[in-house]
Image (tube, helix red, strand yellow):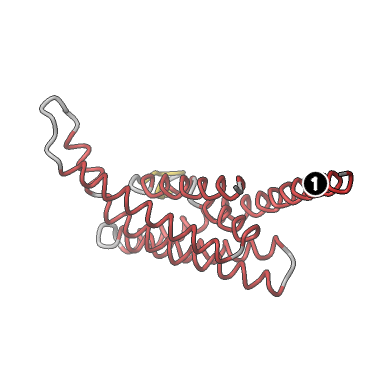
């Protein structure tokens, strides 16, 4: 059982699911309007790169597909909960319905952006790895392209006709910049550090097993 893969996959699912629901709330940072998911969603690309680095693009595609399935199950269950007749003693049903029946459009936008950008991120990362040995380059470039595509698709699909076009384009721009700050400026060094620590640990474990085998 590969505990590292289980942890990274679980972390990826957690960040993605949290991001999808956080995206339903818009926040204002220094007057800039952004979905609150900008706080954690860029980290999905970091985990995507780590899975790609350790297990390859084929595993990335598998994890992305499973994440999509799990998200769809959650949306379906929450939608069902929202339309079921509530108990007379439950006083917050209208708020519950407003939140979770408005979720499908946001989540559809998030799903579409996530699938396209997730596969793109993994594909670019893998292609650069085949031609260049620098982890920092493939991590930064793949995350950069993934974030741009994801931000444009998500904002336009989620808020088109609900937000004026000028504000919509500003939201796309600011979300790209905010995600790049987290995903590239912070995410790339984190990716490199985790890869180095993990490779060092696994190298030590292999060395210890070899010593034990030779001793026996």
Q: Is residue 101 left or right of residue 128?
A: left
The relative height of residue 92 versus residue 98 in the rendered view (above or below) is above
Q: Residue furthest right?
A: 215
The residue drawn where x is 26% and y is 46% is 77
Q: Quadrant of residue 172?
A: bottom left
Q: How many marks?
A: 1
Picture coordinates of residue 101, whole percent (x, y): 22, 48
Q: Is residue 28 left or right of residue 216?
A: left
Q: Residue furthest bottom?
A: 131
The relative height of residue 63 versus residue 78 in the rendered view (above or below) is below
> 86 or 177: which is nearer to us?
86
> 126 or 1: which is nearer to us?
1
Picture coordinates of residue 130, whole percent (x, y): 68, 73
The relative height of residue 37 versus residue 132 in the rendered view (above or below) is above
The residue drawn where x is 62% and y is 60% is 55
Q: Quadrant of residue 89?
A: top left
Picture coordinates of residue 37, whole percent (x, y): 43, 47
> 40 or 88: which is nearer to us?
88
Quarter of the image with the C terminus in it: top right
**Disc 1 target residue:** 209
Picture coordinates of residue 169, whole percent (x, y): 39, 63
> 159 or 32: which is nearer to us?
159
- For label 1, the SS is helix
């Amino acid at each position: 059982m590969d505990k590292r893969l289980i942890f990274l996959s679980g972390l990826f699912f957690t960040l993605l699911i949290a991001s999808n629901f956080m995206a339903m709330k818009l926040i204002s940072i220094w007057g800039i309007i952004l979905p609150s998911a900008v706080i954690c969603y860029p980290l999905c690309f970091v985990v995507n790169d780590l899975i790609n680095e350790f297990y390859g693009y084929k595993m990335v595609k598998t994890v992305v597909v499973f994440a999509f399935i799990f998200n769809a199950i959650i949306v379906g269950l929450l939608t069902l909960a929202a339309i079921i007749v509530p108990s007379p003693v439950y006083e917050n049903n209208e708020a519950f319905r407003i939140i979770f029946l408005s979720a499908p459009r946001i989540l559809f936008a998030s799903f579409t952006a996530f699938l396209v950008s997730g596969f793109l991120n993994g594909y670019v990362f893998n292609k650069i790895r085949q031609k260049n040995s620098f982890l920092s380059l493939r991590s930064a470039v793949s995350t950069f392209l993934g974030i741009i595509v994801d931000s444009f698709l998500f904002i336009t699909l989620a808020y088109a006709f609900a937000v004026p076009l000028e504000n919509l384009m500003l939201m796309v721009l600011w979300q790209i910049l905010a995600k790049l700050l987290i995903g590239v400026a912070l995410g790339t060094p984190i990716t490199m550090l985790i890869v180095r620590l993990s490779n060092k640990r696994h190298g030590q474990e292999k060395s210890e097993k070899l010593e034990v085998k030779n001793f026996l």
